[in-house]
Image: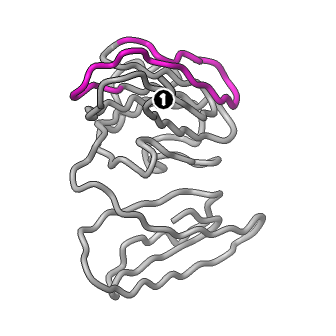
Amino acid sequence: AQADDGVRVWLDEQLLIDEWHGASGQVYSVGRTLSGRHTVRVEYYEGSGQASLRVAYELLPQEPAWDVSYYRGINLEGTPVLVQQEPRSQNPLDQNWTYGSPAPDILGNDIWSARWTGQFEFEAGTYYFRVLADDGVRVYVDGLAVIDRWTDGFKEVSNRFVDMGAGPHTITVEYYDRQGPASLKLWWYLDTSE
């Protein structure tokens, strides 16, 4: 759920998200293992200023794909303030925090950084890696830099990784948000034109 201001979400009369307070586009998420039909109920309130509400669900892989560390400051320095596992989205990594924080009780809305690390299966071939990010981003394949745009502002970047071997490869993504909107989207695909 993404709300400005308060939101509550129930699943089969069980309260899953209870964020009944003023907020500016905060994102809240929760995971459950489900099958069959279920009833979802959403409540919302507008306090002042802008008003928005978005509630969505998606089928995620059973196992978390990413190990993530969040840091205060934009340089991935010191001890992480939050370490957790996160699922792969429809794109391998797709986050839009807008003007909010990935961890509102721990990190501020601005001046934070994070590192995602995951292992993914690839066919042999040449791959395009693409990123949409606001602010800085770096992408590594098995420790080799594929994308390095560690600068403020929105960017759309792509790069080719030639002759990737078949099998598991470690993907690492580093990101920072200095101020303003925060978003990060990463995906890759096999170059079939060869």
In the rendered view, does 110 fall on the left or right side of 139?
Answer: right
Magenta residue span = 144-171
Residues packed near mark 1 inside 10 Å, few (<14), some (14 to 19) or many (20 plus): many
Q: Quadrant of residue 6?
A: bottom right
Query: Is the residue 101 above or below the residue 132 in the image?
Result: below
Query: Is the residue 85 above or below the residue 155 in the image?
Result: below
Which residue sits at x=36%, y=23%? Answer: 125
Q: Is residue 119 shown in magenta? A: no
Residue that label 1 marks? 113
Q: Is residue 162 shown in magenta? A: yes
Across and down, in percent, residue 23 comes to: 61, 60
Q: Residue furthest right?
A: 49
Visible in this render: residue 123?
Answer: yes
Which residue sits at x=35%, y=63%? Answer: 59
Q: Quadrant of residue 85?
A: top left
Query: Is the residue 107 above or below the residue 100 in the image?
Result: above
Which residue sits at x=36%, y=81%? Answer: 11
| Residue toward you, 121 or 175 | 121
Across and down, in percent, residue 142 comes to: 30, 17
Q: Amino acid at mark 1?
A: Ser
Visible in this render: residue 72?
Answer: no
Which residue sits at x=64%, y=18%? Answer: 151
Across and down, in percent, residue 97 comes to: 56, 48
Magenta span: chief secondary structure: strand
